[in-house]
Image (spheres, coloured by chain):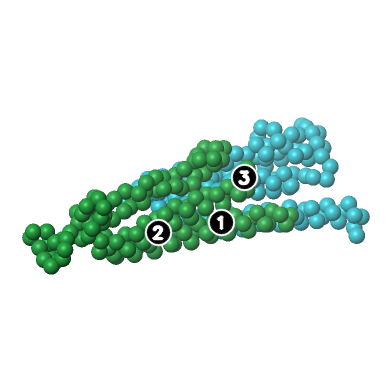
Amino acid sequence: MSTVGLFDQTITLMQKVMDLRLENQQAIASNIANADTPGYVPDHLEFDQQLQQALSNEETQSTGDTPGNPAFFPIDGAGGIEAVQPKVVKDAQQSLAGDGNGVAVDQEMVDLSKNEILYEAATKVLSKKFGLLKYVVQGGK
Amino acid sequence: MDIFQTMKIGASALQAQQVRLNTISSNLANIDTTHTPEGGPYQKKDVIFEPTTLSFDQSLQGAVQGVQVAGIVPDPAPPRLVYDPNHPDAGPNGYVKMPNVNVVEEVADMISASRAYEANVTTIKSATRMATKALEI
């Protein structure tokens, strides 16, 4: 998405957060589904740092020698928010007892709820943002 | 990206756990079966699960996997011997070969299966809520 005009970085960021949370939810669901599969090693997605990095990349770009107009730096280029990919981490620390399954169902359920709440938070931010824009384009009515 | 992916994963697990529960009930139903078409007493059946990547998103490098039943295998443990010389299936020494099914084991397995089923219902519900929230933007 371009940063020109009404739609700014927050919208792109929230969009990406929703995408990543959706992928994370799939990974958690896959771990829960395989809670009884012998030899299954759970996967976890990490993207906090990558997102943090992409955000600071864009900030440096906006305060660097590029013109101050946000239209001048590519948000979807390399190092931008839209290019963030989650890192898949195999859970190696789990004690592989008995059948070699490493899934901790209770931990996964906590992660599932947490992920859902953070997804909802992103949707809330987006709808507030759109609410503000609506308010503005309607002339404050 | 498919918003219904989580539900598909959850559904695959529900199906697998259902097969497991069916197998457990078959084991419990046949706890006293001494006569089978293959000859000998009934043998306890075990369900083997395996991860599946079938038609799932490949972008996550195989992190997203459903589950499927790889097979149902008989337990090779020896039959339980019970002394009952009047039983029609008793051997020459008066011992009857009873199925190698352990009630305690089966019930524990059954609870485990229904808990796993519930956990997957929770993931499906969570996916539904998330999709609904996205529609509310």
Secondary structure at numbered mark 1: helix
Residue B102, image quadrant: bottom left
Left or right: B36 with respect to A47?
left
Circle 1 marks a residue in which chain?
Answer: B
Mark 2 → mark 1, Cα distance in angstroms: 20 Å
Which residue is at 69% across, 33% downward?
A77
Left or right: B114 with respect to B100?
right
Image position, residue B122 (x, y; %)? 53, 60
* Mark 1 neighbour class, 10 Å CA radius: few under 14, some 14 to 19, many 20 or more: many
Colour-to-chain, cyan: A
Left or right: B85 with respect to B51?
left
Mark 3 or mark 2, earlier in chain: 3
Circle 2 marks a residue in which chain?
Answer: B
The one of A123 and B21 positioned closer to us in this rendering: B21
Q: Are marks 2 and 1 in contact (CB under 8 Å)?
A: no
The amino acid marked with disc number 2 is Leu
The amino acid marked with disc number 3 is Asp
The one of B76 and A23 positioned closer to us in this rendering: B76
The one of B29 and A13 positioned closer to us in this rendering: B29
Q: Single out the mark in the foreground, 2 or 1.
A: 2
Which residue is at 46% across, 47% downward?
B67
Circle 3 marks a residue in which chain?
Answer: B
Image position, residue A115 (x, y; %)? 58, 54
Which residue is at 67% across, 44% downward?
A16
Mark 3 or mark 1, earlier in chain: 3
**A47 shown above or below B33:** above
Q: Which mark is residue B124?
A: 1
Q: Which residue is mark 3?
A: B2
Tint applied to chain B in the drawing: green
Image position, residue B9 (x, y; %)? 52, 49
Q: Which residue is mark 2?
A: B21
